[in-house]
C-alpha cells in the first residue's frame, strides 16, 4: 500500500510542478505570440520570434517529459535552461527600485526555487509511476551457466 501512495504522490507532484510551464506556454505564449515576442525584443533578447518558438518547445516538451517520466532528466534540463534565461532577462530585480524591485525579487526567487526542483530531478529522476522507472531501468542480471 505504501508503494501506491509513493507512486500517486510522485505523479501528482510532477503534474503540479509542470502546470506552471504548460499553462504559460499554451495559455499565454502561444495565443499572444506576437505580443510576447515584442516584449522579448524590448528586453534585448536576440531573434525574439525564434527564441520564443524555442521557449515554447522547451516548456511543452520538457513538461510532458517530466509529467510522464520519460527521459525526465532531459525534460528537467530543458526547463532549467528556460528558467535561467527567463530569470536573467525578465526578473532582473537589481535594475529596479522600491516596490518594483521587491516584485521582481519575488519572481526571481520563485524561479530560483523552480530551478532547484529541476536540479533535483536531474539528480534523482522522475521517481515512482514514471516511464523511466517502469520500463527504462536496467534489469538485474541473473546468473547464467556461463557466469557461474
Image: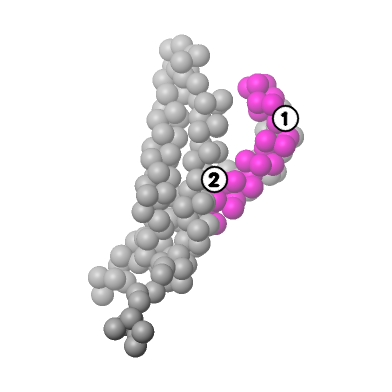
Residues rendered magenta in the picture = 40-64
Give coordinates of residue 142: x percent, y percent.
33, 81
Q: Residue at x 46, y 72 (%)?
A: 135
Q: Nearer the viewer, residue 95 or 27?
A: 95
**Which residue is more in the foreground, 127 or 35?**
127
The structure residue drawn at horizontal position 39% and vertical position 74%, both measured from the top left corner, is 139
User: Residue at point 58% right, 46% down?
Assistant: 59
Q: Is residue 148 visible?
A: yes
Tell me, yes or no, if residue 22 can be seen here: no
Q: Is residue 79 above or below residue 73?
A: above
**Is the N terminus in the top left, top right, bottom left or bottom right quadrant?**
bottom left
* Drawn side of residue 88 relative to residue 47, left or right: left
Would you name the residue on which mark 2 appears? 78
Q: Which mark is residue 55?
A: none
Left or right for 44, reference 77: right
Report helix, strand or loop for mark 1.
loop
- The spot of residue 122 in percent (x, y) is 42, 49
The answer for how far apart the CA atoms under marks 2 and 1 are is 19 Å
Q: Is residue 41 magenta?
A: yes
* Residue that badge 1 annotates: 47
Magenta highlight: main SS: helix
Q: Residues within 10 Å of mark 2 (few under 14, many from 20)?
A: many
Amino acid at each position: 500500500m505504501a508503494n501506491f501512495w509513493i507512486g500517486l504522490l510522485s505523479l501528482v507532484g510532477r503534474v503540479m510542478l509542470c502546470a506552471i510551464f504548460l499553462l504559460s506556454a499554451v495559455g499565454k505564449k502561444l495565443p499572444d505570440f506576437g505580443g510576447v515576442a515584442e516584449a522579448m525584443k524590448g528586453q534585448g533578447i536576440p531573434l525574439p520570434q525564434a527564441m520564443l518558438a524555442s521557449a515554447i518547445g522547451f516548456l511543452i516538451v520538457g513538461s510532458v517529459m517530466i509529467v510522464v517520466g520519460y527521459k525526465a532528466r532531459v525534460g528537467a534540463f530543458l526547463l532549467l535552461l528556460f528558467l535561467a534565461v527567463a530569470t536573467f532577462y525578465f526578473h532582473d530585480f537589481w535594475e529596479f527600485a522600491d516596490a518594483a524591485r521587491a516584485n521582481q525579487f519575488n519572481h526571481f526567487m520563485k524561479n530560483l526555487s523552480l530551478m532547484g526542483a529541476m536540479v533535483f530531478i536531474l539528480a534523482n529522476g522522475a521517481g515512482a509511476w514514471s516511464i523511466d522507472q517502469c520500463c527504462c531501468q536496467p534489469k538485474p542480471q541473473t546468473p547464467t551457466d556461463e557466469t557461474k
